[in-house]
Amino acid sequence: MTMRSSVAPAIRLMRAVSRDSWYRGFIIVLTFLIYTSFHLSRKPISVVKSQLHRNCSAIPDPPANISENDTTWCSWAPFDGPNYKELLGSLDTSFLVAYAIGMFFSGIFGERLPLRYYLSGGMVICGVFTTFLGLGYYWNIHGLWYYILFQILNGLAQTTGWPSVVACMGNWFGKGRRGFIMGVWNSHTAVGNILGSLIAGAFVSTAWGLSFIVPGIIIGSLGIICFFFLIEYPEDVGCSPPIQNEEAKNELGNVQVMNSSTENIFKNQETADLEESVTQQEAVEHPQAISFLGALKIPGVVEFSLCLLFAKLVSYTFLYWLPLYIANVAHFDAQKAGDMSTLFDAGGIIGGIMAGAISDFSGASAITCSIMLILTAPMLFIYNHFGQTSVSATVALLIVCGALVNGPYSLITTAVSADLGTHQSLHGNAKALSTVTAIIDGSGSIGAALGPTLASVLSTMGWNYVFYMLIVADLLACLFLARLVYKEMKEMCSCFNKARGYRSFWKCPGPSQNGTRGRDTQRTLPATYEYSEY
């Protein structure tokens, strides 16, 4: 008899994973790659800055027609003058102001247009505009208007990305471990920054136009992939929705089991009403979109929006000015400064995952953000004064600062935004998710526009003033969470006191923005002990 081997281990593993899990894993990977490309296409400008204005006196064998006193002959006009920092800052400001304004409208459009068309179209357009920035090198364009124009257009096109990917993730994933899942998933921001720095750095010293063209081709190509493969809702491929109807289905199932044990009793009218409501809710695939003012009324949206405004101010100042700061202070060339700046983004990956995990464990998003913001202020001071004393100090402090700066930013823009966008006051209307995400990130984008703009002005007086500005902004971000922190602490103390007679404090439902995500979904306290909403 011919012997047959058992099923291959990899095949057994594939069969053990459910169909829903395969689709959810696919969505995680696809949206991760999509938003990685968005940040990958934003990063080159920060690396190219140090090439647009250079200290040409260090270049050996200058052309014969160049004066010995001319130290900017190798710079790119119009950034070869003494006001180059203001001009470079205007490039950042034009992009970020356009991004901030467009973000408030992007979520509204995203809710009313097919998500797949909206996102993929925006990616292709971003690729085109990013490529045009690089073509300025080959076309020998020295007019400031050209670069500002395409920075504005690119900023508007980039607003299609974030509300769309967060809405897609919110449609596919539940609340239970959303902080950790989105903390891992949100590392796409840091990965995109790292890849963008490395790609831009590879070409910046020889042909900086390719520093824009290559990322433009990448995001445009992924936009085409998005068009063919993105799945907006689990229901579109026959998968079960994870959030909206889960509690209603559990309650319905419990009622049905109780009725089956008493066959001679007619079905309770409340059970029939519940069945009908769940059926109707499942049948409505496209609920009515929420208004802008309606989204602002959701508890916690305003506080986290204002907090993100200042948190993102700090993060984006590092994003756009860190390579130039390292080049000026540590005297690295453009490529080495760009490579060194990736350590800040590597720390951001650690910080985002850590913030999400702590938030899931404690159920206290505001407290988690506040602790990291408080720790950020002294670390910024230490990095400014001691960060360039040695290579090891630079590496360690950049990683720590990246984790503390990007941890709250990552948590608010992902898990907190998704929680607020599926708040219980919305009655399962997932259409609000894109608008809430756009409001929170749009508010943060105002800070993202202010930070680099202020840095361009303050850096002319000295880099110390830039870091003082960052420390003040960090403390203001923490201040706007004060009310939510107080409420979370009060509720945690109340829960601790009331849990003394129960098995464990950590089984007590934690404070959350949606009333469901906390330390444990198991309810060991009476319903009267549940936390109130923000």
Image (cartoon, rainbow, N blue to C red):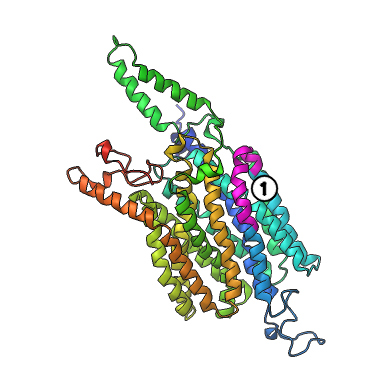
Q: Name the kind of residue labelled 1 in the image.
A: Gly
* In front of the other: 10 or 503: 503
* Outermost left residue: 501
Can you give x and y, in whole percent of width and height, for residue 31 in the image? Answer: 56, 46
Residue 62 lies, with reference to residue 50, above or below; the image says below
Picture residue at 52% right of the left edge, 63% below the top? 315
Give the left or right position of residue 363, taking residue 353 as reference: left
- Element type at mark 1: helix
* Outermost top residue: 264
* In front of the other: 29 or 421: 421
Residue 202 lies, with reference to residue 511, above or below; the image says below
Screen quadrant of the N terminus: top left
Check if residue 105 falls in the magenta segment: yes
* Outermost bottom residue: 68
Can you give x and y, in whole percent of width and height, for residue 11 in the image? Answer: 48, 37
Q: Quadrant of residue 463?
A: bottom right
